[in-house]
Each structure stands twice: as structure tokens, then as C-alpha cells.
Image: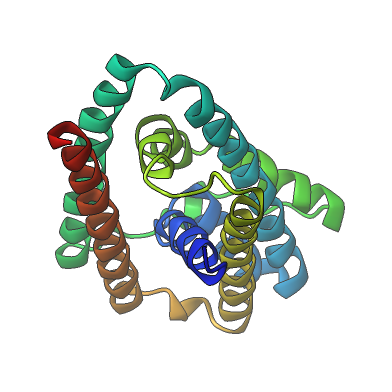
Amino acid sequence: MELWLPFVQGFLFSLSLCFDLGIVNVAIIKTGMERGFKPSFMIGFGSCFGDLFYLSLALLGVSVVFEIAVIKWLFWIIGSGVLFYFTYKMFRETWRPRELPMDAAISAERSLFRDWLAGAGLAVSSPTVIAWFAFAAGTLLATFDLSDRSALLVFIAGFFTAGLLWSLGVALASSLSGAFFKEKIVRVLSFVSAMLFLYFAIKVFWDGLRDVIG
């Protein structure tokens, strides 16, 4: 397998999480506006490791759970439904963008290491991240050819790179101007996220359908 493919798959897989403006992104943006680039980036950097934690659990689950046919088909049905729901949710937010709950985000003065820990903790406790990995990630990962160790490592590298670049970009933009994340930007991010979810939903459903027919 050409190694660029699992890298791109991991990159897009991560971006589908990044584009959802949940509590992690709100914390990065608010910190950038109030305390500057470094603390903001450290929160995002920490969240990358929180996402890696859930990715590791999902990869372990795929190797074990999907050996059982009944569970495999059950996850296929549920995972497809959840992905199509996320697609609908993001398209809805494209037309009716929600306001970012900046008042709910805590941006306290602390060391850079504690900012990193805060980012990791936010990622692990984020309802969006939990729902994504619990209901859709395993089913989606099962459609990727990650049987080769090199492909798996490259996939993880792509996943981590996307989160890192996203954190860097959001931290930089929010530290320069918090006004960057207004309605138009929320619309664009929601639309791109919806297209990614739609791609993954179709991929999961089609691959599962081919297995059933086969």
C-alpha cells in the first residue's frame, strides 16, 4: 500500500473532529484572545494527546470486537446512522450557525504545562469526542486497511499532524483577532465538517453493504 493514503485518511479522520467547534476549540480560542498564542497552542497540543488516547482505544476495539459478526453488523448500522446524523447536524449549523459559548470557557492564568494538561483533559471529557469515538470511530476504522504496521503508524501520524496543525492555526488566529471566529467562519467550518462526515458516512455504509452482499 502506498503510505500517503493512510496518512491522508488519518488526517481527514482527525479533521472531522477538529472542525466541530466544541469545548476544546472554545477553550483554545478564548485563551488565545485573553492570554496569547503560547497558552492557546498548549491547550490545543494537549488535546491532540487526549484524541490519541481515544484513537488507541478505538484501534484496540476494532481488532477485538469486529471479529464477532453480530457486533460487526450492529456497529455498521449504528455507526452509519451516527455519521449521517453528524452530517445533518453540521449542515444545519451551516445554515443556522450557533454562537460560540465563550462565557462558559475557563481561561485561567497557569503554567504552560498545566495548559497542556487542561487541553488533554478537555479532549478526554468532551461530549463530542466521546460520542464520535464511541459510536462511529470503530466502524469507520474497520473500513481502512491498517493491517500493515507501517500503514497503521502512518495513519496515526496523519491523525496527529492534523490536530497539531489545527491547534497551531486556531491559536494563531485567535491570538491575533478573536473576531476571526464569527458567523461566516463558523458557517464555513460547519460546511466542511458536514462534507467530511458525509464522505465517511457513505464510505462506512457502502463498505458495510458490500460485505453483506459478499
With respect to residue 78, does 29 lie above or below?
Answer: below
With respect to residue 212, does 187 lie above or below?
Answer: below
Residue 19: image location, x then y, percent: 41, 62
Q: Quadrant of the C terminus?
A: top left
With respect to residue 19, does 170 lie above or below?
Answer: below
> Among all residues in the image, which is located at the extreme bottom?
176
Q: Quadrant of residue 79?
A: top left
Residue 152: image location, x then y, percent: 60, 50
Of residue 31 and residue 211, the one placed in the foreground of this image is 211
Residue 1: image location, x then y, percent: 52, 63
Residue at (51, 76) in percent of width and height: 178
Of residue 45 and residue 7, the one placed in the foreground of this image is 7
Q: Quadrant of residue 141?
A: top left
Total marks shown come to 0
Residue at (42, 35) in percent of width and height: 138
Residue 68: image location, x then y, percent: 38, 16
Drawn side of residue 33 relative to residue 41, left or right: left
Drawn side of residue 117 relative to residue 66, left or right: right
Residue at (66, 55) in percent of width and height: 150
Residue at (52, 34) in percent of width and height: 58
Q: Quadrant of residue 143?
A: top left
